[in-house]
Amino acid sequence: MKFDISILRAHGIRVAGALYDTMLAHYVMEPEQRHGMDHLARTYLRYSPIPITALIGEKGKDQKTMADVEVARVAEYAAEDADVTLQLQAVLAPLVRKQEAERALAECENPLIPVLVDMESEGIRIDSKALAEYSKVLEKDIAALEAEIFKAAGTRFNVSSPKQLGEILFDYMKIEGKAKKTRTGQYATNEEVLTQLAAEHKIAELVLEFRNCQKLKSTYVDTLPEAVDASTGRVHTTYNQAVTATGRMQSQNPNLQNIPIRSQRGREIRRAFVPRNNDYALLSADYSQIELRVAAELSNEEALQQTFREGRDVHAATAARVNGVELTAVTPEMRRQAKMVNFGIIYGISAFGLGQRLKIGRVEAGQIIDAYFRQYPGIKTYMEATIAAAREHGFVRTLLGRRRMLPEIHSRNATLRQAAERNAINTPIQGTAADMIKIAMIRIHAEFSAQKIKSRMLLQVHDELVFDLCRSEEQVVREIVERCMRTALPMQVPIVVEIGVGENWLEAH
DNA sequence: GAGGTCACG
DNA sequence: ACGTACGTGACCTCG
């Protein structure tokens, strides 16, 4: 457990119990300290005989304010020797109020706690047999690739060691004069470098494929079956709800938010995520282009909003505008560039960064950005206003009021300062999308309970929710999930949710 | 435990 | 001259 109990002592608080209010921690503690608290709080809730509603406060008649909730806590805690939470509340609640973060706390984070408790307890079923077979396939591929690599190199070495690989490629084989170095002076052998080399040198291609197989095997195929809980037969991840800088969640031990999908070899792993039994299927619900829609909303950029209202392909529409051509004249290359620019906007664009991604010069990238800002002036205004606000206050907020402090915004070091400026632009966008899906999760969970739905929410992957779908409930579950996700936050821009159902996670997409 | 790499949104 | 696209977690090597 990473949590350091000294934080309690620092506040002059006697340590008598473990429970703590996750979200209060979010606003006043460092990430390292929050991490442990977050886990402790939910572990406690899962095993506590005290009703959850008593711990987190029930919306309703006589529990309307935070102070009211405290009354309920006092009663429950009187029987326990657990005054830590209470005493911390006294110290921290005024801080939350001072930060005007009560909405994020009351509407989002606190009610989310029991939802996550249920999701973690529920777990997800995986097909360990299928993974074991896939492991054998990968093992053979890896052995064959390794043999070919040794042949191409003319020597044996540890292909998994970036240091050894770099020395073989650039010193022993001398395949390239101008080898890139990493920060520490070692040869860089990452995907970008190897892809460059692959055109001329077969060995680079082989190493990329070796790495791909090795990654899939060691991180997913061999590891997931080991994570199956002996008593439930399912994989139970741990979610941290209040650790990241933006308000997104994390999944760990194992991380179920980075299961492969982009490569053909990788996406096969999703076939091994299966429903609990034959009466169930998996349902996946995705927000479409959520961060770009949030950006259009926050910036009040009329043209971008209009594109979404008309339900058009936003990247193609952007390409048409920026290039000054008809929609029908947009080439795939133009669309690809426009997509990169749209992503760049969300990340807090820079000419250098865009140029690198598009493999074009900084000046040319700058011209594309200028053209973009001419077409979408609201985006430009929004970026400037956001940075100005960050400078004034030292922080930025999401729609719900979640804060991110940005002390580096005043740094004399340009690199640090510019990074803070990109954070200022990105955080309200990424964080508001995070607020939105969290609220959707709370409402879906509530409606499932009220209607005694047997289907269960299993996973959250930032803009996607995955459910064990009881087949007889398909219609009603589709309706609840789509509506709760679409309407979680009131927005001018239409929110679109795409839903798929299948025999496994891959087919549900 | 740091560094490098790579899986995801 | 420098050097960034934003947010994460896990695995492997190596000192």
Image (cartoon, coloured by chain):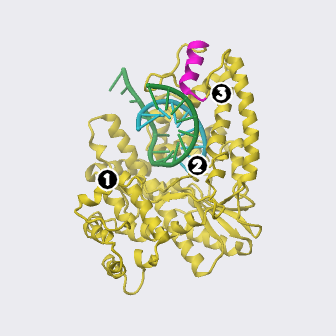
Chain colours: A yellow, B cyan, C green
Amino acid at circle 2: Asn
Of mark 3 and mark 2, the one earlier in the sequence is 3
Mark 3 lies on a secondary structure that is: helix
For the point 66% across and 17% down, which residue is it?
A: A153
Mark 2 lies on a secondary structure that is: loop
Q: Position of residue A35 (x, y in %)?
A: 41, 55
For the point 57% across and 29% down, which residue is it?
A: A192
Q: Position of residue A51 (x, y in %)?
A: 46, 78
| Image marks 2 and 1: residues in contact by CB distance under 8 Å | no
Mark 1 lies on a secondary structure that is: strand
Amino acid at circle 1: Phe
Q: Chain of mark 2?
A: A
Q: Which residue is mark 1?
A: A395
Q: Position of residue A21 (x, y in %)?
A: 37, 67
Q: Which residue is mark 2?
A: A258
Q: Is residue A492 visible?
A: no
Range of magenta residues: A160-173
Q: Is residue A55 visible?
A: yes
Q: CA distance from mark 3 to mark 1?
A: 44 Å
Q: Chain of mark 3?
A: A
Question: Which numbered mark, 3 or 1, is in the foreground of this view?
Answer: 3
Up-down relation of residue A220 to residue A396 (above or below): above
Q: Residue furthest left?
A: A12
Q: Which residue is mark 3?
A: A207
Up-down relation of residue A380 to residue A487 (above or below): above
Up-down relation of residue A83 to residue A158 (above or below): below
For the point 28% across and 56% down, which residue is it?
A: A6
* Quadrant, the C terminus of chain A: bottom right
* Quadrant, the N terminus of chain A: bottom left
Badge 1 density bin: few <14, some 14–19, many ≥20, Cα 10 Å? many
Amino acid at circle 3: Val
